[in-house]
Amino acid sequence: VSNVRIEQQEGTGQPAVLRWASSDPDSNDAELSHTVQVSADGGRSFRTIASGTTRRQIHIDVQKYARQRLLFRVIATDGFLTGTAQTDPVLIR
């Protein structure tokens, strides 16, 4: 997993989009499953907000997380191997 980033449209009330890149390094053609987690305490603990998605993006409710500094973490697995990446702290507006 790499390039985890959030795209926000400030002042629109529209959901932000969390996007990432992922690939299967052992090329066994297994579809990757992703779990997305969020941390509001600097990475000491994470809460799962999406699980089992095969897409490489999810929408984030900006109203729910407004004015919070968050870390987002993505975990990808092919059922055997697992990779993880996260954002830098992001202020949700």
Image (spheres, rainbow, N blue to C red):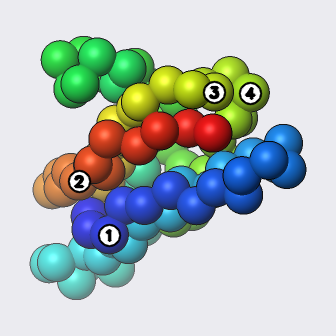
Image quadrant where one finds the N terminus: bottom left
- The reply to whether callout 1 and callout 2 are in contact (CB within 8 Å) is yes
Marks 2/4: CA–CA distance: 25 Å
- The reply to whether callout 3 and callout 4 are in contact (CB within 8 Å) is yes
x, y percent for residue 67? 57, 26
What residue sits 63% from the left and 39% below the top? 93
- The reply to whether callout 1 and callout 4 are in contact (CB within 8 Å) is no
- The reply to whether callout 1 and callout 3 are in contact (CB within 8 Å) is no
Q: Earlier in the sequence, mark 1 or mark 3?
A: 1
The total number of labels drawn is: 4
Marks 1/2: CA–CA distance: 8 Å
x, y percent for residue 10? 72, 52
What residue sits 32% from the left and 69% below the top? 3
Q: Nearer the viewer, mark 1 or mark 3?
A: 3
The amino acid sitting under disc 4 is Gln
Residue 79 visible in rendering? no
Q: Is residue 14 left or right of residue 58?
A: right
Disc 4 residue crowd, few under 14, some 14–19, many 20+, Cα 10 Å: few
Disc 1 residue crowd, few under 14, some 14–19, many 20+, Cα 10 Å: few
Give the residue number, with chain letter if any, for mark 3. Answer: 66
Q: Earlier in the sequence, mark 1 or mark 4?
A: 1
Disc 3 residue crowd, few under 14, some 14–19, many 20+, Cα 10 Å: few
Give the residue number, with chain letter if any, for mark 4. Answer: 63
- The reply to whether callout 2 and callout 4 are in contact (CB within 8 Å) is no
Give the residue number, with chain letter if any, for mark 2. Answer: 85
- Look at the numbered disc 2 and give the secondary structure of its residue: strand
